[in-house]
Amino acid sequence: MRAGQKLGLILLLTPLLLWLSLLIIIPHIDLFLLSLRERVGVRQYETGLANYTTILTEPLYMVTFARTAMMSILATVLTLLIAFPVSYYIAKMARGRARSVLFLMCLVPFWVSELVRTFGWMILLRESGVISGLLQWAGLAAGPVEMLYNDAAIMVGLVYTSMLFMVVPLVTTLDSLDDAVIEAGYDLGGSGPSILREIVIPHAMPGIVSGSIVVFMLSLGNYLTPTMLGGKDSLWFTQMIYSQFIVRFNWELGAAFGFMLLILSSLIVWAVLRLTGQTLEKTMG
Amino acid sequence: MTTPLPDLECDALTKRFGAATAVDNVSFTVPAGSFFSILGPSGCGKTTIMRMIAGFLEPTSGDIRIKGRSVLDVPPNKRPVNMVFQHLALFPMMNIADNIGYGLRRKGMAKPEIVRKVDEALDRIGLPGIGARRVDELSGGQKQRVAIARCMVLEPDVLLLDEPLGALDLKLREHMKVELKALQAAFDTTFVYITHDQSEALVMSDSIAVMNAGRFEQMGTARDLYYRPQTAFVAGFVGDANRWQGRVIRAEGEALEVKTDGGLILRAVSPGRTLSVGDRAEVFVRPEAIRLAENAAHVAQFDTQISGNVATILFNGAASRVIVTDASGAEIEVTLPQSGEFAHLTRGAPVHVGWSGDQGNAFAATGL
């Protein structure tokens, strides 16, 4: 390689390398070292796995993690179920202008900050909110109805926040499915459901998996939505990390929490990939 | 017993898209076991006809009958018609055996029976033992055959083929023409083939319909279309032809004498059409119907004789042509015989060309 080309390559790679090393690798090494420190006294530390044993032996922590993971999986499944027909319509049925408009409509909510969007849900769902008011006006409820601060509210918020991240990869993969292949399915005697099962879904699998991974990770790591819609005590794993770092000032345990989240979520993604017979290269490539 | 029912009948088939008429009152009948082609330029409505027969489009009016039974209210997945798509549309997510077995599985056939039928079909198309391969491991010609086998295992009454050779390279296309014809004979099924490539249609078909702007211009055998075109469009579209505009200066029944706008005097015939002196006419003469000679005596027997010079030699092996310009500058394209006689022909050489009047097809000019 000529010297000029080499310089060009280095310059092109610099932002990526800076990003990776400064924002991902170095903080994580530091966090990892931090998580291995045990506080034995005031300003006295030893290296050990005590923080991790605390997490594994304290049921509340593991229960919170399991709950967060289950809720995230449920949110992912719900998002997929809602986004699939939407994406199919955008990719295969809508034509020309309607298509861009529909796609834009999926995008528009993301022009508003997540905080404001979540406030929107609070305005709708709170005791003195729009839906509660409508129910009372229609005579369906005797008094104000509180719809915030429960798991259903969290779920609504998570699905709403994640929708775009499922729609985009699904539209892309469904778009690449030749219409003639679907027609061939009908022509050879296939019915709607059988074509969906044997042709459309297998083709869309990479998009389904990559969308699901993104939505799952976003839900798992979401702090704002569970806190605002589920309340301060909604037992979301990120809230535990927050409270260790900020409230308790126990950075060591907080770092260990962070690492557990990374390891456990990676395990779940790996298991799902194995189960569906997909690989990361196939879904991301 | 009455005469056997034709496999496919289209009766006054019409399709309009908004104000545009894609298919205009087309009727035809395809007898059982024959190879029928619809030949036309792109955008003439041939794909629309095919999609209506397959059931993906609903005709605005008219009827489609398969073995005498109207199929208009039968959805595409229930019609006894299968289609080979332009880009084949094999299922990339399945292997070859699953592709071919797809229709059988949908019919609810027992597994061992499917395996047997798929193997049989693979033998039939000369690709035994490739069932476990993936679609993208096959060559273009192999995919073609798999796409046909995938339809044929279902034993359709009619197989529709939508320009399936379009994506293949020239050599393979030539080969597949012969092979398709052989496959049709082997499966003994009615094929309806649409194409814009006249040589595909001429080589394979028992009967051809030439289509233009939503209508059938002419229907007949390849020979009919080539030797006895009934419209100017067919004369120009099927095979190559020299084309002149002019005015009729003498008419003796069907035999005409035409003076072209360039000043050539030609003889032509107009069987079944009436053209009288003074009418504008269009004359088509095929390059291969014109005799080329270096000596005027060799074209003396023809009633149209022109002398000129070689303007260009278009060498293309067996299909080589010479463009001859006469004194007035009019160009005449003539097939160059490869018998060695003209091997030394060069640009500017004086030559004589001639043809007999019945090789010139004259049509009333369409106001151009």
Image (cartoon, coloured by chain):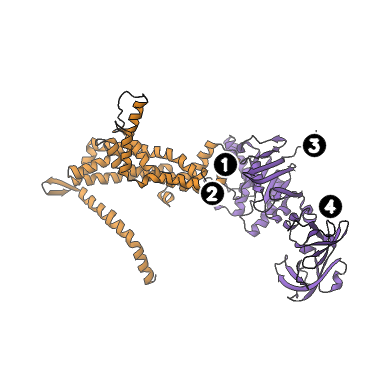
Chain colours: A orange, B purple
Q: Quadrant of the N terminus of chain B?
A: top right
Q: Residue at x 17, y 42 (%)?
A: A248
**Left or right: A109 in relation to B37:** left
Q: Quadrant of residue B321?
A: bottom right
**Left or right: A277 in relation to B85:** left
Q: Is residue A79 visible?
A: yes
Q: Amino acid at mark 2?
A: Arg
Q: Residues within 10 Å of mark 4 (few under 14, many from 20)?
A: few
Q: Is residue A142 above or below residue A264?
A: above
Q: Disc 1 sits on a residue from what chain?
A: A
**Foreground: B28 or A272?**
B28
Q: Which residue is mark 2?
A: B134
Q: Which residue is mark 4?
A: B272
**Left or right: A203 in relation to B149:** left
Q: Which residue is mark 3?
A: B3
Could you say which disc has been placed on residue B280 in the image? none
Q: Amino acid at mark 3?
A: Thr
Q: Residue at x 34, y 45 (%)?
A: A112
Q: Is residue A50 visible?
A: no
Tell me which numbered mark, 4 or 3, is placed earlier along the sequence: 3
Which x, y percent locates residue B172? 64, 57
Could you say which disc has been placed on residue A185 in the image? 1
**Foreground: A106 or B72?**
A106
Q: Is residue B35 above or below residue A133?
A: below
Q: CA distance from mark 3 to mark 2?
A: 45 Å
